[in-house]
Image (cartoon, helix red, strand yellow):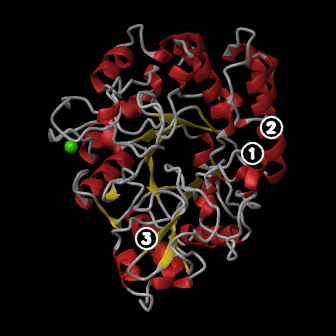
Amino acid sequence: MPWWQTAVFYQIYPRSFLDTNGDGVGDLEGIRRRLDHLVWLGVDALWISPFFRSPMKDYGYDVSDYCDVDPLFGTLADFDRLLAEAKARGLRVIIDWVPNHTSDQHPWFREARASRHSGKRDWYIWRDGSPERPPNNWRAAFTKGPAWTWDEATRQWYLHLFLPEQPDLNWANPDVVAAMHDTLRFWLARGVDGFRMDVIHAIGKDPALPDVPAERAIIPACALNDVESTHGLLRAIRGVLEEFPGERVMVGEVAVPWTEVVARYYGYGDELHLAFNFPPIFAAWEAGAWREQVDRAARELDPRGAWPTWVLSNHDNRRHRSRYGSEARARAAAVLLLGLRGTPFLYAGEELGLEDAVVPAERALDPEPEGAVPTAVVRARNRPVQGSRLGTHARPRHTSTGLRPEALARETIGGAPGGLLHGTTRSCGGNLLQRVGCLARSNCTQCVAGCLGDGCRIRAAQTRQ
Ligand SMILES: [Ca+2]
């Protein structure tokens, strides 16, 4: 089996991990210093969220230079050192890639915006019209507004499925394709094992840019975009990865709410290697609901030979410890996550059962829809890191239970009761992260699902297999 089918992935949002220079923001050096701990924990691969140059309107998902490290997080030399030391420990490393849009401060967009006659004008998606009426009814994510911004200077609209500061690239332009392929080669040549590809399903657009049906117009257009041209783009991107030796992996964020649609982005063994399947995140912690999700993943992914992924928490969602409402449920969820057939993704801090924290509205930084409950942790990205102090810097949204490396070391390295996985590791007779192979690698989702809600135990599931 390829490594990415048996690996446990561990997502690190650098800003919130460990700050090593006292500026209140986690950095690449902070990750490097904790590699030994991550090895001890038993994870096989790291996914590092964006650390590229960015104005940080969307905290790194608005990239102004795909091929450099933002000074906030360190330098390219810091990244190379982190990668080398991770590899020396047997850890794989994948990094984020944000292909749907750039920052409005990216030189490509600045050039495109300068004039209708710019050589880069067509690298983005522009439409004529009047300033009163956007070209279609698409809605942007994060705002309640349209997915279009009127550029008064050149008197055209440009498309942005997210913030106005995140203009969508025009992947129908072969120069864009070539330039973005080169950004992949830049990191592949440095040795990364692959990419987590941000909203990858959205890069192809219907050239007619038709209205979405009125009853769906309230849904952000990025969650509805599903067009054939994306699949050809994905096959070409996979070809770029295959130029390089080793098993480089494409993990796609296919942020649509239907597993049957997610399945199509695996192609037939020629598009994504792995795709996130988010409907389970939104399932209640209830046996029937989860059984349906597990059944559906098998039913809709297996016919394509698509390998499932499982994720309970990430930077865009509330932590499942908070969603499910108790530590006991978080423990059971950990067993489920790591036992299901497929590749599990842990979000840093999940191994401790960390909860969301409440953040006063005046300290909010993450872009969020107007009217969102200010104290609700809608996006779990930006937490002060270990050692940061409130009141000193422009502050991330969430005060924190955040990842606490010292506490983590105390609770899990020392083996003392208290770490989320402590009880489960004992009941498995080993490190839960060194998963029971027969569960993770074979077709026994049914037996895991079958004992959900009945005092599910890994051992019981093994017996049933
Ligand atoms: Ca720092």
Q: Earlier in the sequence, mark 1 or mark 2?
A: 1
Is residue 463 depicted above or below 18 in this figure? above
Distance, label 1 to label 2, CA atoms, is: 7 Å
Check whether the beta carbons of the residues at disc 1 and disc 2 lie within 8 A of each other: yes
Is residue 372 depicted above or below 127 in this figure? above
The amino acid on which the numbered mark 3 sits, given as a three-letter code, is Thr
State which quadrant residue 173 falls in: bottom right
Q: Image quadrant of ligand 1?
A: top left
Residue 259's disc number: 1
Dot 3 falls on a residue whose secondary structure is helix
Is residue 248 depicted above or below 134 in this figure? above
Nearer the observer, 209 or 172: 209
State which quadrant residue 119 falls in: bottom left
Mark 3 surroundings: few (<14), some (14-19) or many (≥20) residues within 10 A? some
Which residue is under mark 2?
296
Check whether the beta carbons of the residues at disc 3 and disc 1 lie within 8 A of each other: no
Horizontal placement of 96 versus 254: left or right?
A: left
